[in-house]
Amino acid sequence: MTIYCRGIRGATTAEANTREAIREATRDLLERLIAANDLRIEDIASVIFSTSSDLNAEFPAVAARELGWLDTALLCTHEMAVPGSLPRCVRVLIHWNTTRRADEIVHVYVRGARSLRPDRAVTETHSAGTAHDA
């Protein structure tokens, strides 16, 4: 059985530029990604979080630490400030060691970030325990 390092993408939006809103939105996104892909912490190699430049009240990685990702390499950065880009957006790229094929990975886009990838959007009525609709 060959193990590959695959990328899992996701994005969400925070309701405000507050510590609580950024942590809540990020935690919700991570919980959805965990449920959709059956992620185990020990299989995650590293995670890159980015935020739109209007979010600076908290590091999104704090939410991952709160979920127990204590030994995982985490990095936070800002996205390019492209005119007209989605405000209050948190994006994530998880590097995951897995035997799954790339087409078996579930990428999750929720809240305002559904517009970024409508083909991977999740409806708001679903809980973190369900996969995306697309």
Image (cartoon, rainbow, N blue to C red):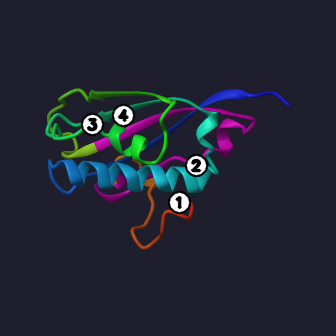
Badge 1 element: loop
Q: Residues within 10 Å of mark 4 (few under 14, many from 20)?
A: many
Sequence order check: which comes first, mark 4 or mark 3? Answer: 4
CB under 8 Å between callouts 4 and 3?
yes
Magenta residue check for 109: yes
Identify the residue at image location x=41%, y=38%. 92
Identify the residue at image location x=41%, y=52%. 29
* Residue at numbered disc 4: 49
- Marks 3 and 2 sit apart, C-alpha to C-alpha, by 24 Å
Looking at the image, residue 68 lies above or below residue 70: below
- Marks 4 and 1 sit apart, C-alpha to C-alpha, by 21 Å
Looking at the image, residue 71 lies above or below residue 105: above
Sequence order check: which comes first, mark 2 or mark 4? Answer: 4
Sequence order check: which comes first, mark 4 or mark 1? Answer: 4
Q: Residues within 10 Å of mark 3 (few under 14, many from 20)?
A: some
Q: Residues within 10 Å of mark 2 (few under 14, many from 20)?
A: many
Identified by mark 2, the residue type is Val
Identified by mark 4, the residue type is Phe
Q: Which residues are magenta?
A: 90-114
Magenta residue check for 36: no
Q: Quadrant of residue 102?
A: top right
Sequence order check: which comes first, mark 2 or mark 1? Answer: 2
Of the 4 image quadrants, the one containing the C terminus is bottom right
In this rendering, the label closer to the viewer, 3 or 1: 3
Identified by mark 3, the residue type is Phe
The label shown at residue 59 is 3
